Image: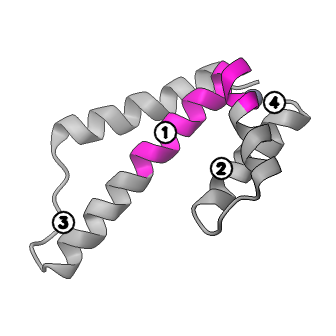
């Protein structure tokens, strides 16, 4: 993982908590265009984010926590892709 990958992953996690500036956003988009490892990381983040979003919704609705096998497989696959291609 090089300097740009570290910055890109930092920007991606920042994006969940705050609005990125225009120049941060552009740097991130350009890096994702050229770097497959970070694209995979972005996919995993999106997947995890929607997973936690659904989880929160379920907890709020008091329906109990269930995770379908298909979701579990998708998360596992996304995470393994990220660690395989990182670096
Ligand atoms: Zn990268």
Q: Which residues are magenta?
A: 30-48
Question: In the rendering, at what x and y percent does residue 22 appear?
Answer: 76, 52
**Is 38 rendered above or below residue 22?**
above
Question: In the rendering, at what x and y percent does residue 55 appear?
Answer: 27, 64
Looking at marks 3 and 2 on the same chain, the residue that comes earlier in the sequence is marked by: 2
Looking at marks 4 and 2 on the same chain, the residue that comes earlier in the sequence is marked by: 4
The residue depicted at 69 percent of the width and 26 percent of the height is 86
**Is 33 rendered above or below residue 42?**
above
Residue highlighted by disc 4: 1
Looking at marks 2 and 1 on the same chain, the residue that comes earlier in the sequence is marked by: 2
Q: Decide whether the magenta segment is chiefly helix, strand or loop.
A: helix
Task: For label 2, count other residues whose C-alpha is less than 10 Å away and answer few (under 14), some (14-19) or many (20+).
Answer: many
**Which quadrant holds the C terminus?**
top right
Looking at marks 4 and 3 on the same chain, the residue that comes earlier in the sequence is marked by: 4
* Distance in Å between CA atoms under marks 4 and 2: 15 Å
The residue depicted at 32 percent of the width and 33 percent of the height is 74
Badge 4 residue CB within 8 Å of ligand 1: yes
* Distance in Å between CA atoms under marks 2 and 1: 11 Å
* Distance in Å between CA atoms under marks 3 and 2: 27 Å
Q: Which mark is residue 65?
A: 3
The residue depicted at 82 percent of the width and 48 percent of the height is 23
Looking at marks 1 and 3 on the same chain, the residue that comes earlier in the sequence is marked by: 1
Is label 3 in a helix, a strand or a loop? loop
Residue highlighted by disc 2: 12
Looking at marks 1 and 4 on the same chain, the residue that comes earlier in the sequence is marked by: 4
Is label 4 in a helix, a strand or a loop? loop
Residue highlighted by disc 1: 44
Question: In the rendering, at what x and y percent does residue 21 appear?
Answer: 76, 58
């Amino acid at each position: 993982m090089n300097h740009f990958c570290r910055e890109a992953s930092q920007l991606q996690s920042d994006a969940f908590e705050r609005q990125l500036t225009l120049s941060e956003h552009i740097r991130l988009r350009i890096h994702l265009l050229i770097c497959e490892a970070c694209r995979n990381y972005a996919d995993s983040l999106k997947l995890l984010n929607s997973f936690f979003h659904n989880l929160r919704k379920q907890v709020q609705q008091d329906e109990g926590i269930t995770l379908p096998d298909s979701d579990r497989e998708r998360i596992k696959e996304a995470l393994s892709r990220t660690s395989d291609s990182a670096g």
